[in-house]
């Protein structure tokens, strides 16, 4: 009987495919790539056409042996890796490494793991597409050349153990430039005037209308409200028009990442991980795509569901075209494999993401929403007193019945933002003004990127492709060039003037602003690396260059460019840039002189040190010079003299408790109290610069109480402790933790019992 071996990338995918193919096929996994460039050397010979030297990692040796044996015994070997360039390269590496003859090799690919799609692929095998393979190889080689050649220069000129990358460095540049825009931003204020009006004759409720201009100063705002005293308003015009809202296209990789971030709070990496599981279990189509097209089967299924559920008027079949720059491979959009399946089995994240994909797909095939928009213009006879009331009524929900796309500018709210309904008024209607209020409002700085909005920007610039977005974000976070974090809200004062009962009142209020969650902030090392690359490797971090390289990869994939000719052109200028950087570039540590300490007169500087960004009080020759690490969120580029001097106020000697000194300071993990050699973290609301001794003592006692509750048994002679932990009791010995087996009472353990548990675990 003919033996069929199918090789895929992942065990989960293998399991799903095996169910569809049955007993005639053996399905196994390569666990991703089976060979790559060496981690220890360049692995590329520019003198010989950039020929790459691929090696098999040690942890894949046994796998290769087993796959080679299985391939040798099979009559046909079906290479079923993913249908993109990376998948094509995996198929080629498998064929080459396992030495599978052409006549035994069958390449199959499918954009959804369903029985029909798999069987159709089996019936229509093809050859390995060497254009796609070479496009992937060109990317791998070019990225290795950049990383391997530039990184050592960074080690020498900036700091050891740094790295550069063609796409990652451009992503860091985007974050750094946005941070500098925010640093340079100067907020300006103006007054927004809003009034409450009613029509006594028609007995309407109060409705809001806004002055059609902003007032620049508080003096102008107050004077304006004074001119509104005792004046009568009337409706001068009513404009009504019907508008349409169209649904968003089905998901691509980047739009899925963006919406999952806005609606579900998922990181880019989390979205791709969950989507991968949904794809491999046959729930959705392939999740790395920049196509917005849907198959005829999907269009038909969506139409039937919409018509059956909501009626024919809600259905509108649409086929979208890709909007992203340089969209590649003719995949489908990301959609459920079976539109009829409204719910799935799985964990919470899988269910949420599937529901999002299902709703987006269905909504894309639904009719436009129809909206009646009304604008009422009113004034008191003066051109400077024109107020406008805007209302909106949805007269036909259309796709909004199922799904509403979110925006980066506004957090997702249930049901979305809805404009108010206005009373039925006509030109000439006399109005009565209730309260009129002028409130100071401030211009907002450009927003910092989220992971998803950074992906959106990269896509707009043509930087990267669906398969590279998540790894790029992951890399810049792992390298700590960029951190993902939150910033607490700040407080500011604002002024408002209120006209009521013919009297203008001024009020001074405070408001919170600027709170940020899950935003990307550049670290000092990221800024320094970016500035160095911008000065000496400008072409590498140039947006147009990076986008052009992606276009070149696309041309290689379509057979219109030879892969190593493209690399030759790149390397001829790149090698000259490398030589110039080595000869002319100067070391950089971001050092800045901030000023002199007003008390001691000593200079205060900041720079990047061996253990991170630091401030120095005193010059290098001063035997009494002091150092302090910068606080979280402080940057070398923006820290002020006052902020730096504050750092030197720590550690603080608080006094004595039980005859032992109490110190407050800051460390790698935040502010802490030190007492009798023990460290206790300060609370989130505690300021290390103003916390009192009483508060420190309370924290010390609280920590002692928690430690006592945690302690169950102790055998000091063997340095063994039995403790209560977050996940239950455990044994602590020699800086290792050992789980206590079920059925053992931790309070009755003997020394012998503990030693047996430790020995058994160490011998496993």
Image (cartoon, rainbow, N blue to C red):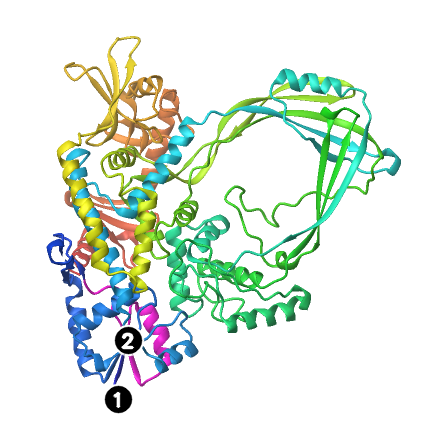
Up/down of 472 relative to 609, above or below? below
Up/down of 157 relative to 469, above or below? above
Magenta highlight range: 6-35
Residue 328 left/right relative to 403: left
Residue 483 falls inside the magenta stretch: no
Give the image location of residue 506, x and y in percent: 66, 17
Residue 1 left/right relative to 350: left
Q: Residue at horizontal 62%, vertical 67%?
A: 306
Up/down of 703 relative to 284, above or below? above
Residue 548 left/right relative to 353: left
Give the image location of residue 370, x and y in percent: 68, 54
Q: Earlier in the sequence, mark 2 or mark 1?
A: 1
**What residue is pinned by disc 2?**
127
Q: Quadrant of residue 179?
A: top left
Residue 506 left/right relative to 621: right
- Quadrant in which the N terminus is drawn: bottom left
Residue 15 falls inside the magenta stretch: yes
**Which is more foreground, mark 2 or mark 1?**
2
Residue 2 badge: 1
Give the image location of residue 10, x and y in percent: 30, 67
Give the image location of residue 37, x and y in percent: 17, 58
Depth check: 588 or 567 in front? 567
């Amino acid at each position: 009987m003919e033996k069929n071996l199918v090789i895929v990338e992942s065990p989960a995918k293998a399991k799903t495919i095996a169910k569809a193919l049955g007993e005639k096929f053996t399905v196994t996994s390569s666990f991703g790539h089976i060979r790559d460039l060496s981690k220890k050397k360049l692995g590329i010979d520019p003198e010989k056409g950039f020929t790459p030297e691929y090696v098999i990692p040690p942890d894949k040796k046994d796998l290769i042996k087993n796959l080679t044996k299985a391939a040798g015994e099979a009559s046909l070997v079906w290479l079923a890796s993913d249908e993109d360039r990376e998948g094509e390269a995996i198929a080629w590496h498998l064929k080459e490494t396992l030495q599978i003859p052409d006549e035994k090799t069958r390449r199959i690919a499918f954009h959804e793991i369903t029985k029909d799609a798999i069987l159709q692929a089996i019936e229509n095998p093809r050859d390995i597409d060497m254009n796609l393979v070479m496009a992937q190889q060109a990317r791998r080689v070019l990225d290795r050349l950049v990383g391997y050649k530039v990184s050592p220069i960074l080690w020498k000129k900036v700091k050891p153990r740094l790295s550069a990358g063609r796409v990652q460095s451009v992503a860091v540049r985007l974050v750094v430039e946005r941070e500098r825009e925010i640093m340079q931003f100067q907020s300006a204020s103006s007054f927004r005037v809003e009034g409450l009006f009613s029509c006594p004759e028609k007995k309407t409720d109060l409705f809001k209308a806004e002055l059609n201009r902003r007032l620049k100063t508080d003096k102008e705002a107050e004077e304006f409200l004074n001119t509104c005293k005792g004046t009568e308003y009337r409706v001068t015009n009513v404009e009504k028009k019907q508008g349409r809202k169209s649904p968003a296209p089905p998901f691509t990789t980047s739009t899925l990442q963006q919406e999952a971030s806005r609606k579900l709070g998922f990181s880019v990496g989390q979205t791709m991980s969950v989507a991968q599981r949904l794809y491999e279990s046959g729930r959705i189509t392939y999740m790395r795509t920049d196509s917005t097209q849907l198959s005829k089967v999907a269009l038909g299924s969506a139409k039937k569901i919409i018509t059956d559920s909501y009626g024919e008027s809600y259905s509108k079949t649409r086929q979208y075209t890709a909007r992203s720059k340089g969209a590649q491979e003719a995949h489908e959009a990301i959609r459920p494999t079976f539109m009829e399946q409204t719910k799935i089995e799985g964990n919470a994240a899988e269910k949420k993401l599937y529901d999002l994909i299902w709703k987006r797909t269905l909504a894309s095939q639904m009719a436009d929403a129809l909206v009646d928009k009304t604008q009422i213009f009113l004034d008191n006879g003066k051109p400077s007193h024109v107020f406008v009331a805007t209302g909106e009524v949805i007269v036909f929900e259309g796709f909004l019945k199922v799904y509403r796309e979110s925006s980066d500018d506004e957090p997702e709210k249930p049901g979305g933002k809805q404009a108010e309904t206005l009373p039925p008024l006509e030109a000439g209607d006399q109005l009565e003004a209730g309260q009129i209020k002028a409130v100071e409002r401030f211009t907002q700085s450009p927003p910092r990127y989220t992971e998803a909005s950074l992906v959106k920007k990269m896509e707009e610039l043509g930087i990267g492709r669906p398969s590279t977005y998540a790894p790029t974000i992951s890399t810049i976070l792992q390298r700590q060039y960029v951190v993902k974090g939150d910033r607490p809200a700040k407080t500011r004062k604002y002024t408002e003037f209120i006209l009521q009962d013919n009297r203008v009142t001024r009020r001074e209020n405070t408001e919170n602003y600027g709170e940020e969650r899950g935003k990307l902030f550049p670290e000092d090392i990221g800024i320094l690396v970016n500035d160095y690359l911008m000065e000496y490797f400008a072409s590498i971090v140039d947006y147009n260059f990076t986008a052009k390289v992606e276009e070149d990869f696309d041309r290689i994939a379509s057979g219109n460019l030879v892969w190593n000719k493209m690399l030759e052109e790149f390397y001829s200028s790149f090698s000259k840039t490398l030589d110039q950087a080595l000869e002319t570039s100067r070391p950089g540590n971001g050092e800045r002189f901030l000023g002199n300490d007003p008390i001691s007169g000593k200079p205060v500087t900041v720079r990047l040190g061996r253990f991170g960004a630091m401030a120095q009080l005193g010059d290098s020759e001063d035997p009494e010079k002091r150092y302090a690490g910068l606080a979280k969120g402080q940057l070398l580029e923006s820290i002020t003299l006052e902020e730096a001097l504050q750092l030197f106020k720590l550690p603080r000697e608080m006094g004595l408790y039980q005859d032992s000194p109490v110190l407050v300071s800051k460390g790698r993990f935040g502010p802490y109290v030190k007492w009798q050699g023990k460290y206790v973290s300060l609370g989130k609301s505690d300021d290390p610069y103003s916390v009192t001794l009483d508060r420190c003592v309370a924290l010390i006692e609280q920590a002692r109480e928690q430690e006592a509750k945690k302690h169950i048994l102790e055998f000091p002679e063997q340095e063994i402790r039995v403790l209560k932990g977050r996940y239950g009791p455990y044994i602590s010995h020699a800086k290792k933790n050992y789980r206590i087996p079920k059925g053992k009472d931790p309070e009755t353990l003997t020394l012998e019992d503990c030693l047996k548990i430790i020995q058994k675990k160490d011998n496993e």
